[in-house]
Amino acid sequence: MANCSELIQKLRPCLGTLKPYVAGKGFTEISRKYGIKPEDIVKLGSNENPYGPSPRVAQALRNISPERYPEPEDLMAGLAGYTGYHEEMIVIGSGMDGVMDTLTRLFLDKGDKTAIFTPTFSYYEILTITAGATPIFMQRGPEFQISTDVPKDAKMVFICSPNNPTGNATPEEDVRAIVESTDAIVFLDEAYVEFADHSLIGLVKEYGNLIVGRTMSKAFGLAGMRLGYAVAPQWIADQYRRVAPPFFGITCASVAAGVAALSDQEFMRRSVEKICVERERLQKEMRSYPSQANFLCIKTAETSHEFVEKFLERGVIIRDCRSFRGAGEHHARVTVGTPAENDRLLSAFREICALL
């Protein structure tokens, strides 16, 4: 029988260049490391909605039949009503990452290239490499703006707007310039768009190579349900349904939660409004970069590792951005919480700044 050292040679060579995804730290990890009770920890490192989903979600989850496979018809109808697009142009998956995974299986092959504007969501790079393709990294400018000159040989272009972890949105004229200048498939990630001034989802009607991705994790408060979707030209949506996993990787619970959340958009809008008010308060005191998301990006004087560690020691979880390619050693990301959570954050911030 072959030993592990021999079997590992069977792994795909492309995995040698893969940087694994780094998630935000959780309550259990911080509690164990620093001896802080979980209930005394404020979690502001994963861009979750502190207000959670509509109360209708809990009611819906009590009525699911877990022994049955999911039936997405009501979910598709709800998404069609929310986006204004016909169901045939909407695709769903297990989170935004599940949607992107299926899309890259459609378009990327060994030898292909993708354009990725860094720093940004690292999963674009992971999907590219696991497809056998090569990522072309394009560093954002001093205000985190992107170039409209994409490589001519790119097969896909990934744009996150508002961008994670920087919070800035890409102007419509820049997105149009990119889409019109390339025959690559452009994926516009609007995971945080409900917190922004406007969406560019309407552009899908105009361009045959543009896909707009969305999630129910952020504004709708369903991060634990793993439910994402995208609006795409029908030719792409049709092919997506051919290669998607059974039942699109969703569950009875995620379908029920999604339908319930979409039926109570007023709750979502109130949550977004409260988060945006608090975002402005934090931005003024912490002197962060401008943001159109539910988080802020901060430039740190000391290394981001040292800066973030001081917050963790005080039971406040924020994100060290070193794991984002191109972010450097001096940026941290802070999720906007409830007023009480933000008070804890600011108290720690003042205390830490006083020691510098």
Image (spheres, rainbow, N blue to C red):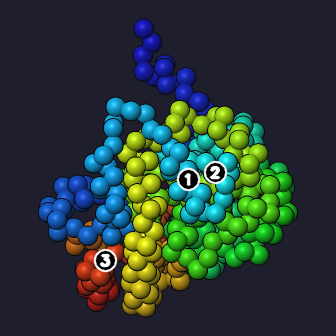
Residue drawn at point x = 83 percent, y = 58 percent: 182
Q: Which residue is mark 1?
A: 77
Image quadrant containing the C terminus: bottom left
Query: Is residue 108 left or right of 320 when viewed as pictured?
Result: right
Instruction: Kindly identify which residue carries mark 3.
Output: 338
First in sequence, mark 3 or 1: give its number: 1
Residue 57's place in the image compared with 274, above or below, is: above
Residue 162 in sight: yes
SS state under label 1: helix
| Numbered circles on residues, count | 3
User: Is residue 135 visible to the viewer in this orientation of the structure?
Assistant: no
Precedes in sequence: disc 3 or disc 2: 2
How would you rate the neighbour count of disc 1 (Cα within 10 Å): few for under 14, some for 14-19, many for 20 or more? some
Q: State the mark number for residue 87.
A: 2
Residue at left 70%, top 67%? 202
Q: Which residue occupies 22% across, 73% down? A: 314
- Locate residue 12 relative to residue 259 in the image: left or right: right
Proximity of marks 3 and 2: CB atoms separated by less than 8 Å: no
Marks 1/2: CA distance?
7 Å
SS for dot 3: loop
Rendered view: 350 above or below 74: below
Residue that appears at 54% across and 24% down: 9
Q: Where, quadrant-wise, is the N terminus in this rendering?
A: top left
How far is mark 3 from mark 1, CA to CA?
Answer: 32 Å
